[in-house]
Amino acid sequence: MPAVSAGRSKPLVALAASLIAPAAIAHEAGASTESGWSFETWVVVPMALSLAWFLIGAMRLRGRGADAATLGRRVACFLAGWATLVAALVSPLHAAGARSFAAHMLEHELLMLAAAPLLVLSAPVGIALWALPHRMRLASGRAGHARAWSVLWAALTGLGTATALQAIALWGWHAPRLFELALAQPGWHIAQHVCFLGTALLFWYAVWRAPTRNGIAGVVGALFFTAAISGALGALMAVAHGPWYARYAALGLTPRGLSPLEDQQLAGLSMWVPGGLVHAGAALWLLARALRGPLAARDVA
């Protein structure tokens, strides 16, 4: 496949922004239909643009003789990740999150545990760059090679840094004071969603690249560490004796008839069990591949 080298990193910001923007503003305004689907302009438009941008790049690469199997896998990963964003931000799940903490938690889990790794596995920047005019593509590559940007990107995507940033975002935003602030003020909710999806993208990028940088031990440790800390947070919610968040407690029974405490316990279980399984499963998958032979970048990209 025609390749774009380290210059990919700066355009990643633009592509990631087009993907993060819908998540960031998904709760800012209500434009739900009677069926429960949400079609806020500032969610739908960035998602449509990111999809068009990627697919145009994929078609141009295909026309230049790119390997069909590799390109097909990356397109499939991108479409699956994009569809997961739709499920989280446009489907009735999004509207349900306004009344149910468990639904809200599932929305965040989809962003961090499904959409983010799928989008990273699609290696979208190298494909999306081909949607740009020739001169703009070359300029983007040169900008991505700038020393200051390269140093910053390497620091942000270091395995330890990315793992710590995601852990801080996860625990920090679930602290009652910050979570209540995000529920009460759209601007803070935007910041919350940017942190969740943005740090998840950095984390999974670091995870898929770490075996080619430093071997498998570090990435397996990071995945199990993340499983442990997210599981611990979920467990604390699940065994709590009362609701953590006053705004959800004030709503009373959820549409499914759960009390606020039961709704929180269900949310905690969804973070504790599925979240742990995703991270542990990714660690075991990478470990199994490493045991079969050295990992190459193409094996995880």
Image: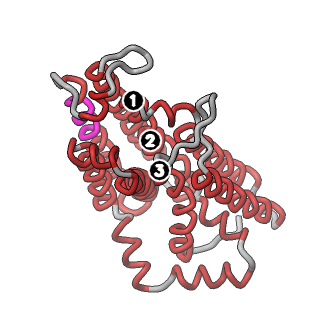
- Amino acid type at mark 2: Leu
Q: Residue furthest right?
A: 63
Mark 3 closeness class: few <14, some 14–19, many ≥20 residues within 10 Å:
some
Q: Main secondary structure of the magenta part?
A: helix
Image quarter where the N terminus lies is: bottom right
Residue in the foreground of this view, choosing between 284 and 267:
267
Query: In this picture, which residue range is highlighted in magenta?
Result: 228-236
Label 3, label 1: how many angstroms apart (C-alpha)? 28 Å
- Circle 1 crowding by C-alpha within 10 Å: few under 14, some 14–19, many from 20: some
Whether 155 is drawn above or below 29: the answer is below
Query: Label 3: which residue?
Result: 28
What element does badge 3 sit on?
Answer: loop
Q: Which residue is mark 2?
A: 113
In the rendered image, residue 196, in percent from the top left (x then y), is placed at 38, 50
Q: For this rendering, which residue is in front, 189 or 20?
A: 189
Q: Which residue is mark 1?
A: 274
Residue 2, horizontal then vertical, whole percent: 70, 69
The C terminus is located in which quarter? bottom right
Which x, y percent locates residue 21? Answer: 52, 58
Q: Is residue 135 positioned above or below 185 on the image? A: below
